């Protein structure tokens, strides 16, 4: 409650922690991973959720001279992340994402999860053993008090209600402030993230 400080050498995983936090809370179309590195002028490493699931850790030169990603998990694999929130009243909420990819495909499948309790990611171990049967996933999670969503929008509406987040813009502002090192224009920043569009704009357009 008094705040947290993350300190570590370059490459120790600080950005990875914040990327996971951002993925859980930010609409995919507005998500910018490792944005601080981009803002600092470094060459972008094109991080993506798929790259994290695959465990991309570098590149090598292929036979055609092009860069080929080095991965820890090149075949069928799955991954999950979770974040637990609790307040002084003892209420606990867990947000989690489940991802899986089959074979060497780049087709990333996902489910967004919400539980009003502590949720251990090992509770998902059965899913891979069940050959990623989504029907079984729903049958297993629902009685255990875990809601599963196919779309981020429905998931966001559910966790926003539970956590008392009144506006999507608050999530975008959080993502922007935690993932940037500089703001080029305070005016543009305030207009985009902190001010609602005046109703007079619509009246003028009409």
Image (cartoon, rainbow, N blue to C red):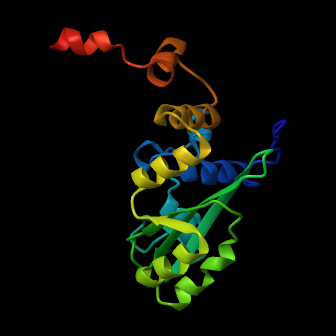
Quarter of the view holding residue 93: bottom right
Residue at the image position 42 percent from the left and 66 percent from the top: 65
82 or 78, nearer to the observer: 82
Identify the image quadrant of the C terminus: top left
Identify the image quadrant of the N terminus: top right
146 or 151, nearer to the observer: 146
Asked whether residue 74 is in view, the answer is: no
Residue at the image position 44 percent from the left and 50 percent from the top: 28
Q: How many marks?
A: 0
Asked whether residue 195 is in view, the answer is: yes
Percent x, y of residue 127 = 54, 83
Residue at the image position 50 percent from the left and 70 percent from the top: 99
Position of 53 with respect to 13 (left or right) is left
Percent x, y of residue 119 = 68, 67
Quarter of the view holding residue 3: top right
Question: Can you say whether 104 is above or below 26 in the image?
Answer: below
Quarter of the view holding residue 191: top left
Question: Can you say whether 180 is above or below 194 in the image?
Answer: below
Percent x, y of residue 172 = 51, 35
């Amino acid at each position: 409650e008094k705040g947290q400080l993350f300190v570590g050498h370059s490459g120790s995983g600080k950005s990875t922690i914040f990327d996971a936090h951002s993925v859980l809370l930010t609409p995919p179309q507005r998500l910018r991973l490792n944005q601080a590195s981009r803002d600092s002028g470094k060459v972008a490493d094109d991080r993506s959720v798929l790259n994290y699931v695959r465990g991309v850790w570098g590149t090598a030169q292929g036979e055609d001279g092009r860069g080929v990603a080095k991965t820890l998990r090149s075949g069928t694999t799955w991954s999950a992340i979770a974040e637990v929130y609790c307040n002084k009243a003892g209420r606990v909420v867990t947000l989690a994402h489940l991802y899986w990819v089959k074979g060497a495909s780049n087709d990333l499948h996902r489910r967004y999860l919400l539980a009003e309790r502590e949720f251990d990611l090992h509770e998902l171990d059965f899913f891979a053993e069940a050959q990623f049967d989504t029907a079984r996933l729903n049958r297993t999670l629902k009685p255990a008090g875990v809601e599963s969503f196919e779309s981020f929008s429905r998931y966001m509406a559910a966790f926003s209600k539970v956590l008392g987040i009144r506006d999507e813009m608050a999530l975008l502002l959080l993502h922007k402030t935690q993932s940037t090192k500089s703001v080029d224009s305070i005016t543009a920043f305030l207009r985009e993230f902190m001010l609602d569009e005046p109703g007079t704009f619509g009246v003028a357009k009409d």
